[in-house]
Image (cartoon, rainbow, N blue to C red):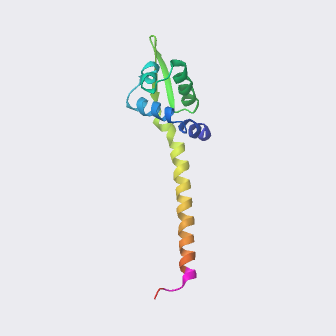
Amino acid sequence: MLDRALAALADANRRDILERAAVRPVSISALAEPLGMSLPGVLKHVRVLEEADLLVTSKVGRVRLCEFRPRSLDEVAGWVEDRRRRWDRLLDRFATHVADREGPST
């Protein structure tokens, strides 16, 4: 699921859709207008977001509403945080190594 989420988040239009769906549930047609996209074009992006479990849609009457699923970002956030911690440790070890090679400060 992480790969799907990262691939889905790689597209600026899909990030915009998530931003707007995070405020409140929003219809496909309301998403299409500011993006300057056709309804089928927006629907393709929505489907990618649904497959990544970042968005859920529901039909209310004749309108399909999109709602952001914030908990689905937990896996992405955890992966990013783990990588950040690993790099911090490596950089700290590198800084210590450089300082040891330079010898004591005078």
Q: Is residue 101 magenta?
A: yes
In this view, the residue farthest toward the top is 62
At horizontal 50% and vertical 26% (from top left) the residue drawn is 56
Q: State which region is magenta.
A: 100-104
**x, y percent for residue 64:** 47, 17
Residue projecting furthest to the front: 36
Residue 78 is inside the magenta segment:
no
> Among all residues in the image, which is located at the extreme bottom?
106
Q: At x 54% / y 75%, what residue is drawn?
A: 96
* Residue at image location 53% in from the left, 50% down from the top: 80
Q: Position of residue 47 (x, y in %)?
A: 56, 25
Count the labels in the image.
Answer: 0
Whether residue 15 is situated above or below residue 97 in the rendered picture: above
* Quarter placement of the C terminus: bottom left
Asked where in the image residue 103 lies, by quadrant, the reply is bottom right
Which residue is painted at 54% across and 44% down in the image? Answer: 76
Closer to the camera, 75 or 18?
18
Residue lying furthest left: 23
Magenta: main secondary structure: helix
Location of residue 31 by image quarter: top left
- Report x, y in % for residue 77: 51, 46
Quarter of the image where one finds residue 101:
bottom right
Question: Which quarter of the rendered picture does the N terminus lie within?
Answer: top right
